[in-house]
């Protein structure tokens, strides 16, 4: 705070400063008939933290968010905001804002009237109300659109109105349900940064639901990965990317090669496996506790940017031999798709500048990686 | 040249289609339209084609105390029925569309039953119930049964509007701190108001036009205009019937047009 640049400090002073509250989710369960939507999830979000709930559809992330908003009831477990238990509190008494997937703007009200709604419900006087609406509109840069109806705005503008309406009553916690899902890619990336800046300025706690792992990695302080109603891993984006807890997270976050094989030998944490076309190495995943014994099925996970490719020389080389199947130009990197001897595909991302000259589809190549760059997970696919 | 041939064929088919439409419309409207010239007849009994021209029958309709009483009574019944069935029907639609009612389908079927059961069955049932209670020929009696008959129209129209309204709007209202009542008043109600109004028009007409039940439960003192029309057809057959009918047809068209215009104004 002491080192804040003057401009940022001024912005902070001008903004309605909100201090976020911690959110506690403990041992929450929700079943719908035979389907378990949320299976004993516990998660503590610190005040002012930006946490994403990330998972495929049906992973329970939206159900969890709806419970925090009060539109779904947990069958057991406890939800808290700050010191307050909100498990059984009515949705309109929670003081927890929500930004809906399709914005849910009131179509018969102007932008200003939409933003005024939560203030009117709180019986905030006219002068104060107008000042706050102006401030909220200023924050989302929509001063000029105050008198328009939602239908007259673009998707991005509607998104901003929804945001302004959610922050105008200075809630300590803001829930967001895939708020950028309906925007095109360019605008989405722009809004991600803007949202993040706004959250920092407000100091509010944000719980953000998304199925887009890139979005979660970009915006969050921490990401909670959910699958089949269970919390699989919780951690900062970098930790999720570098140290995935299991093969699901490894596969779900970023690009990942997952090669099935059989454990040959364990030397401390170093695991050697027999895979398609040869021998691969990697470090045993942290929670594999002893499940990686010789002869057991396992999968080695390696990021495409860690795979090194060399042209096959004919002499004996360390690594997995294969044939270059496809070269895909992606801008800064070029993806080399290698078909290993047994038909498994392996992707290597090579910097376009150092793109291996002389390689073309059909070239014989050898793929390898440093043992420390790969993780080995127990079990078959 | 093929273009010209297919064009000619298409317009030929179109012509036939339009001709059929016009014939169907004529078939539906002629009986009503015939009433209009007959109402200006100068003869003392209904004839077609009408002979002469006079406003005499309109004068009779507007000055005869029996006609005035019956018309005013019908209007009073219809107004109260509209009020009651709009409130009840809107609340019913809310419960059916937004609520989590057990046996929803059964309730829905029962609500819509008056549209399906033949009116004569309803009339006999109502008469047998109302007579011992002293409700026949009374304003409350008419309003009660007409409300039951009009509610389905309101439920149908308002349910359709609620189904088109995303529930997330009401959820957003709650989330932003509004009570259920505040959310209904400020969000749901303004958005479905045009449909409620359309439902109210249907309810009014359902009551004002209602003949069979009214025929059964009308008294000597209080009779509806439909009952009065029926009696006159039976005993007098004077062109005043045509004059009254013309007034009702024109006012019905005006009401439908108003409801439609308000709906259009709301969606713009």
Image: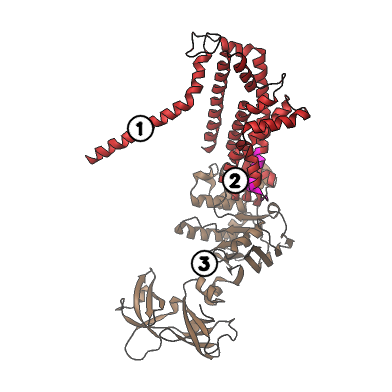
Front residue of this view, candidates A128 and B59: B59
Query: CB atoms at circles 1 and 2 under 8 Å apart?
Result: no
- Residue B26: % across, % down: 44, 26
The residue under label 3 is A213
Q: Position of residue B170 (x, y in %)?
A: 62, 48
Q: In the image, is residue A47 above or below residue B99?
A: below
SS for dot 2: helix
On the same chain: label 3 and label 2? yes
State which region is magenta: B89-105
Q: Which residue is mark 1?
A: B16
Residue B140 appears in the figure? yes
Q: Nearer the viewer, mark 1 or mark 3?
A: 1
Q: Would you say residue B1 sits in the magenta stretch? A: no
Pick the residue in front: B50 or B9.
Answer: B50
Q: Residue at x 48, y 60 (%)?
A: A189
Residue A240 in percent (x, y) is at 55, 73
Q: Nearer the viewer, residue B97 or A121?
A: B97
Name the one closer to the observer, A151 or B144.
Answer: B144
Name the residue at 62% across, 26% down: B211
Image-quadrant location for residue A67: bottom right
Instruction: Examine the rendered structure and indicate whether residue B144 appears above or below residue A85.
Output: above
Q: Main secondary structure of the magenta part?
A: helix
The residue at which mark 2 appears reads as A114
The span from disc 1 to disc 2 (Cα, nearest Å) is 52 Å
Chain A: colour as depicted: brown
Chain name for mark 3? A
Q: Which chain is red?
A: B
On residue A103, which mark appears? none
Q: Earlier in the sequence, mark 3 or mark 2?
A: 2
Disc 2: which chain?
Answer: A
- Residue B148: image x %, image y %? 67, 35
Residue located at (49% from left, 15% from top): B37
């Amino acid at each position: 705070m002491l080192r804040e640049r003057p401009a940022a400090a001024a912005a902070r002073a001008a903004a309605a400063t909100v201090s976020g509250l911690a959110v506690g989710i403990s041992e929450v369960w929700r079943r719908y008939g035979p389907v378990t939507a949320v299976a004993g999830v516990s998660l503590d979000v610190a005040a002012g933290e930006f946490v994403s709930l990330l998972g495929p559809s049906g992973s329970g992330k939206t159900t969890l968010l709806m419970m925090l908003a009060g539109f779904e009831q947990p069958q057991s477990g406890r939800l808290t905001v700050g010191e307050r238990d909100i498990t059984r509190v009515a949705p309109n008494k929670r003081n927890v804002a929500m930004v809906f997937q399709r914005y849910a703007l009131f179509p018969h009200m102007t932008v200003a009237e939409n933003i005024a709604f939560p203030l009117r419900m709180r019986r905030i006087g006219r002068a104060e109300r107008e000042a706050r609406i102006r401030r909220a509109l200023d924050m989302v840069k929509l001063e000029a659109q105050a008198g328009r109806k939602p239908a007259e705005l673009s998707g991005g503008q509607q998104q901003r109105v929804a945001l302004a309406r959610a922050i105008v009553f200075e809630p300590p916690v803001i829930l967001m349900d895939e708020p950028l899902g309906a925007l095109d890619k360019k605008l989405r990336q722009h809004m991600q940064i803007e949202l993040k800046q706004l959250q920092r300025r407000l100091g509010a706690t944000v719980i953000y639901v998304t199925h887009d792992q890139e979005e979660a990695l970009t915006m969050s302080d921490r990401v909670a990965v959910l699958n089949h109603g269970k919390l699989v891993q919780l951690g900062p984006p970098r930790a999720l990317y570098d140290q995935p807890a299991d093969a699901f997270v490894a596969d779900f976050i970023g690009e990942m090669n997952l090669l099935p094989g059989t454990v040959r030998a364990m030397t401390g944490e170093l695991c050697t496996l027999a895979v398609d076309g040869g021998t691969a190495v990697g470090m045993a995943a942290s929670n594999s506790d002893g499940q990686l014994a010789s002869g057991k099925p396992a999968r080695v996970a390696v990021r495409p940017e860690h795979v090194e490719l060399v042209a096959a020389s004919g002499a004996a080389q360390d690594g997995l031999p294969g044939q270059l199947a496809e070269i895909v130009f992606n801008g800064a990197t070029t993806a080399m798709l290698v078909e290993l001897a047994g038909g498994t595909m392996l992707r290597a991302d090579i910097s376009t500048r150092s793109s291996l000259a002389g390689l073309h589809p059909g070239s014989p190549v050898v793929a390898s990686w440093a043992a420390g760059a790969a993780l080995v997970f127990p079990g078959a696919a | 040249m093929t273009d010209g041939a297919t064009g000619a064929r298409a317009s030929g088919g179109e012509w036939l289609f339009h001709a059929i439409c016009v014939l169907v419309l004529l078939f539906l409207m002629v009986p009503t339209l015939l009433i209009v010239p007959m109402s200006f007849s100068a003869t003392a009994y209904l004839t077609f084609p009408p002979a002469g021209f006079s406003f005499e029958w309109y004068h009779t309709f507007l000055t005869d105390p029996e006609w005035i009483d019956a018309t005013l009574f019908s209007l009073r019944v219809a107004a109260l029925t509209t009020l009651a069935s709009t409130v009840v029907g809107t609340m019913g639609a809310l419960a059916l569309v937004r609520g989590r009612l057990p046996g929803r389908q059964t309730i829905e079927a029962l609500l819509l039953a008056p549209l399906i059961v033949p009116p004569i069955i309803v009339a006999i049932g109502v008469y047998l119930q109302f007579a011992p209670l002293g409700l026949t020929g009374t304003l409350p009696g008419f309003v009660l049964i007409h409300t039951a008959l009009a509610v389905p129209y309101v439920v149908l129209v308002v349910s359709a509007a609620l189904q088109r309204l995303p529930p997330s709007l009401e959820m957003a209202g709650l989330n932003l701190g509004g009570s259920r009542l505040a959310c209904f008043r400020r969000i749901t109600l303004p958005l479905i108001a045009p449909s409620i109004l359309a439902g109210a028009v249907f309810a009014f007409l359902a009551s004002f036009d209602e003949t069979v039940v009214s025929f059964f439960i009308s008294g000597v003192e209080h009779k509806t205009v439909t009952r009065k029309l029926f009696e006159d057809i039976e005993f007098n057959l004077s062109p005043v019937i045509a004059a009254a009918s013309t007034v009702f047809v024109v006012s019905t068209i005006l009401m439908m047009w108003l409801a439609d215009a308000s709906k259009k104004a709301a969606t713009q």
